[in-house]
Structure formats: C-alpha cells, structure tokens
Image: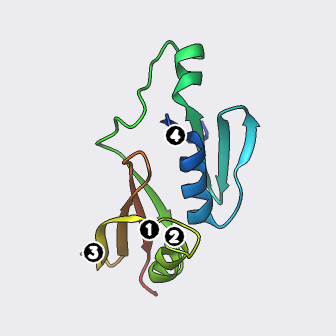
Amino acid sequence: MKFASIRVVTRNFESLIAFYQRLAGFDAVRLADEFAEMRFEGATLAISSEHLIKRFNGGAAVAAANRSAILEFEVQDVDAALERMNGTNASEAQVVMPATVMPWGNRSLLLRDPDGNLVNMFSRPAR
C-alpha cells in the first residue's frame, strides 16, 4: 500500500492555494476546477472545494471543521520559512506557537492556514 495524499476541503479555494504556494515556494498543479495538488517531496497535499465534495462525495467532509490533525512540513530554516510566509505581498500568517525547540529536538513553529487548520513548520537538529 502507498500513502498517496492528504486532502483539505475548503470554502476558500483560492486563498488556501495561495497560502500553501507561499509556504512551499512553488505553484499548485490544478487538475480540475476547484481541485489542485501541492506535490511536495515525499507527499502530496490535495486541496478541494467543499462544492466538489458535496457534488461527488455526498458532503462526506466539511470545510474548516478540523480540530485534530496537524499538517507538518520539514524545512531547513524555520525563521526563513516564516519570513517567506510574511512576505511583503502576503497577509501575515497567524502564528499559534512561535518557534520553539521541542523536547525531541525539533525546532517547531505552528501556524493556522486560512481555514484554521494547524500547520507545523519544523527543522530537525543537526546530527
């Protein structure tokens, strides 16, 4: 079995795409109206409008209702990643937890995406 992707369902398709494009530093692959993929090394983040879920999946998922999952992205430099997120042409990312060294050694920063999903940008300690 291959873990293929995680899909985030949204009512704010364009703002969610813009957030994750800014985070990644590359463009989403738009496969259909209101459906796109961010193809990261090792994982894919799919983004779908709630409209498509209602149409094709009987409303099985509800946009902006997550309070249990955290999307995690390993970066080389947490501060540089946050700076990119808060670039001059972007609205400032909502920081939930400032960069903190966790007990297991990772330096971690928690943000919220436009739908309120938690996003962890972290770097591993040098080994």
Foreground label between 1 and 3: 1
Foreground label between 3 and 2: 2
Q: Measuring 66% from the left and 45% from the top, which residue is drawn there?
A: 37
Indicate which disc, 1 or 2, sits on the residue closer to the N terminus: 2
Vertically, is 13 above or below 40?
above
**Structural crowding at the residue carrying mark 4, measured as other residues with C-alpha within 10 Å and reported as few (<14), some (14–19) or many (≥20):** some
The label on residue 9 is: none
- Cα separation, mark 4 vs mark 1, equals 17 Å
The residue type indicated by label 4 comes to: Asn
Indicate which disc, 4 or 2, sits on the residue closer to the N terminus: 4
Q: Where is residue 79 in the image (x, y as percent from the top left)?
A: 45, 82
- Cα separation, mark 1 vs mark 3, equals 24 Å
Q: Name the residue under label 4.
A: 12
Q: Measuring 30% from the left and 43% from the top, which residue is drawn there?
A: 68
Residue 115 or residue 99, whichever sits in front: 115
Q: Measuring 36% from the left and 72% from the top, which residue is drawn there?
A: 108
Q: Name the residue under label 1.
A: 92
- Cα separation, mark 4 vs mark 2, equals 18 Å
The residue type indicated by label 2 comes to: Met
Mark 2 falls on what kind of element? helix
Indicate which disc, 3 or 2, sits on the residue closer to the N terminus: 2
Vertically, is 87 above or below 60?
below
The residue type indicated by label 1 comes to: Glu
